[in-house]
Amino acid sequence: MFGAIEAGGTKFVCAVSDEKLEIIEKVSIPTETPDVTMAAVFGFFDQYELKSMGVGSFGPIDVNEKSDTYGYITSTPKIKWQNYNFLGALKTRYGVPIAWTTDVNAAAYGELTYGAGKGKQSCIYLTIGTGVGGGGVVNGQLLQGFGHPEMGHIRVTRLEGDTFSGVCPYHGDCVEGLVSGPALEKRTGQKGQTLAEDDPVWKIQANYIAQALMNYTLVLSPEAIILGGGVMQQAHLFSLIHEEFEKVINGYVSYPELDKYILPTGLGSNSGIIGCLQLAKEKLESLSN
Ligand SMILES: Nc1ncnc2c1ncn2[C@@H]1O[C@H](COP(=O)(O)OP(=O)(O)OP(=O)(O)O)[C@@H](O)[C@H]1O
Ligand SMILES: [Zn+2]
C-alpha cells in the first residue's frame, strides 16, 4: 500500500492507496500543533502496511538532500512547526522510503501524471488561496534544487492608481500580497466568495495574476499553467486572465492556445494527494531498479 500526506496550513489530507493508486481511505486532519496533528496522522497510517510514502508539505521546507535539515519545515509563520523534522518523524515511525516535496510540486506532479497536464513533460501548478504558491515539473522532474520555488512571492508592476499596500508579512505587495484570498478580502472588505462577477476588482486581480504567469512563461516556458485554490473557483477569472495575459506579454513569445495553456485543474482538490501517491510509487520503483 502507498501512503500520501498533503500537509497544508489548515489541514493535513492523508490517504492510502493500492498499487494502482486507487484510494482506499482518505482523511482530513486539522493543522494544529505538531504533537496533536502528528498523533492523528500516525493513528491513521498505523492501521496499514505501507510500502512507501509521498509527502507534499506546506513550507518553506528543506528539500536539499545534502542539507542537515533535509525534511524539515523551516521558516513557516506557524511558530510551532518551525524547524520541525517532519520527514524524520515519519521515517522513524514507518521505516519505509518516503518522497518529500512541497504541496504545490506534488500537485503539479499529480496534474502532469493524471490531470490537466497529462501527456506533457512540463507544467506549473499555482494555487491562489489563503496564500499563493507555485510548483512545477520540467522534463518530468520536480522543480527543486538548493531550495524550492516560491512563485507566489515574486513582484509585479503595480497598476496605475492602485495604492493597496498588500498583505504579505514579508513583502507587502508581492503577488501573494496582492491576489491571495485574504488580499482580496482586505482590498474589498468582503470575502472573494461573496463578490459579484462584475466587480471591478476581478480585472485588477486578473492583471496581477497574468503578470505573474507571464514571468513564469518567460523563465520556464512550461507546456501548461494549471490554476487551483479557493480564489480560482471563480471560473470567470480564467477568461479575464487570458485577456490580460495576451495584453501583458504583447506577442513577444509564442505559447499554446490560451484555454489549453492557462487552465483549471483536472483533478479538482485531489491534485496534491494523487501527486503524493504517484511520488510514493515512483520512490519505491526507483529503489528496486
Ligand atoms: N469561491 C471562491 N471565490 C473567491 N475566493 C474564494 C472562494 N473560495 C475560497 N476563497 C478564498 O480562498 C481562500 C481559501 O483558500 P483555499 O480554499 O484554497 O484554502 P487553503 O487550503 O487554506 O489555501 P492555501 O492553499 O493557501 O493553504 C480564502 O481567503 C477564501 O476567501
Ligand atoms: Zn511575499
Image: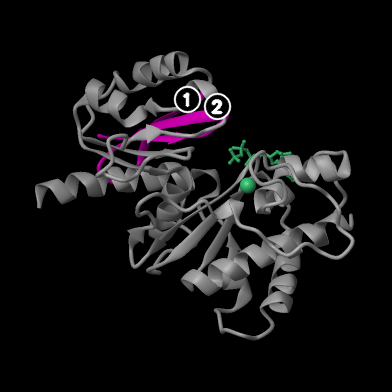
Query: Mark 1 CB in 8 Å range of ligand 1?
Result: no
**Residue at point 40%, 45% (across, down):** 274
134 lies above or below 211? above
Q: Which residue is mark 1?
A: 81
**Residue at point 20%, 32% (across, down):** 96
Element under disc 2 = loop
Query: Which region shows up in magenta?
Result: 1-30
Left or right, 52 with respect to 72, comes to left
| Residue type indicated by callout 1 | Trp
Left or right, 253 with respect to 146, comes to right
**Residue at point 35%, 51% (across, down):** 146
Instruction: Answer yes or no: is residue 223 visible.
Output: no
Q: Which residue is mark 2?
A: 78
Left or right, 127 with respect to 89, comes to right
Residue 14 in magenta stretch: yes
Residue 194: % across, % down: 84, 41
Residue 3 in magenta stretch: yes
Residue 79: % across, % down: 53, 23
Main structural element of the magenta stretch: helix, strand or loop? strand
180 lies above or below 249? above
Res. 137 image quadrant: bottom left
Rendering quadrant holding ligand 1: top right
| Residue type indicated by callout 2 | Lys
Between residue 125 and residue 112, name the one nearer to us: 125
Cβ–Cβ below 8 Å for labels 1 and 2? yes
